[in-house]
Image (cartoon, rainbow, N blue to C red):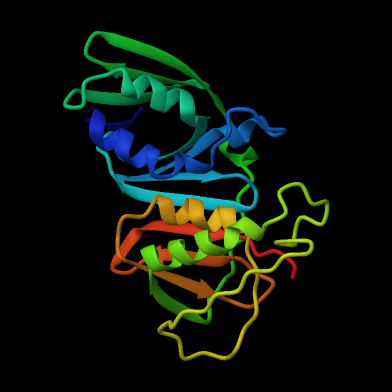
Amino acid sequence: MIVLKAQQEQVLAALQSVAGIVERRHTLPILANVLIRKNAQQLELTTSDLEIQIRTQGELGGDGGQFTTTVGARKLIDILRSMPSDQVVSLESQQNKLILKGGKSRFTLQTLPAEDFPLVQESAQFGPAFSVPQKTLKALLGQVSFAMAVHDIRYYLNAEQEEAVDELDIDYNGDSIEIGFNVTYLIDVLTNMTQDMVKIELADSNNSALLTIPDDLHFKYVVMPMRI
């Protein structure tokens, strides 16, 4: 089955949009992989580090039908970077492997079962939501991130004896809610966004938050909260 067939720059851009949280070395080897889900012409890519999950979807050609697997994200990106941006590449499934082809090049990649990929639990229905310019939110997080305790055993704390507070106006009409996040994860998410506005949807203070780009349903970032 041909999982995808498109220009190198299209495939690389999709992978790079979700690969920011992927670590080459992890206690769970499968977290170095990207989860690939294909449904007809729609292809979905998902990565996770157990605390944050990034997903993108789009049409990248290939055969119809359904298919799921996981493959090393960084390795796939490294191979794609070695190819011309205007070259048509294809990814084909073959038993427990994926074959990446481009021009006269052919690469065989090992896969791991999709059912072993640990997805972050998403709330069935998000409630409160607000929108804010992503550059503003990123700048504010940068102003307070210095107070984080890098190696504090109480990892949910942002500081032991220091505290930084900042406020901003947002477009929000819901009930009052107090929720905490690892500031590094939020900055990582915002770094991968180029749009001016970001939408944050909350269910409650104990469940994950969904960050999306208004008017663009292709990108979804799920971030788990931290105890405060």
**Where is 209 relative to 192, above or below?**
below
Q: Nearer the viewer, residue 64 or 42?
A: 42
Q: Please state the horizontal and vertical placement of residue 177, each as a whole percent of the image.
A: 62, 83
**Where is 23 relative to 200, above or below?**
above
Q: Quadrant of the C terminus?
A: bottom right
Q: Please state the horizontal and vertical placement of residue 111, each as a whole percent of the image.
A: 54, 25
Residue drawn at (31%, 39%) of the image:
13
Q: Please state the horizontal and vertical placement of residue 30, each as a whole percent of the image.
A: 62, 33
- Asked if residue 69 lies left or right of residue 89, the reply is right
Q: Nearer the viewer, residue 97 or 146?
A: 146
> Looking at the image, which residue sits at the far top?
104
- Asked if residue 73 lies left or right of residue 162, the reply is left
Q: How many marks?
A: 0
Residue drawn at (75%, 62%) of the image:
157
Residue drawn at (40%, 76%) of the image:
131
Q: Nearer the viewer, residue 177 or 53?
A: 177
Q: In the picture, residue 209 is in which quadrant?
A: bottom right
Q: Nearer the viewer, residue 46 or 114?
A: 46
Task: State whether residue 135 appears in this view.
Answer: yes
**Where is 59 relative to 214, above or below?**
above
Q: In the picture, residue 123 is in which quadrant?
A: bottom right
Residue drawn at (72%, 65%) of the image:
162
Q: In the picture, residue 98 is in which quadrant?
A: top left
> Looking at the image, which residue sits at the far left?
86
> Looking at the image, which residue sits at the far right?
153
Q: Please state the horizontal and vertical placement of residue 214, each as a whole percent of the image.
A: 32, 69
Q: Quadrant of the N terminus?
A: top left
Task: State whether residue 63 appears in this view.
Answer: no
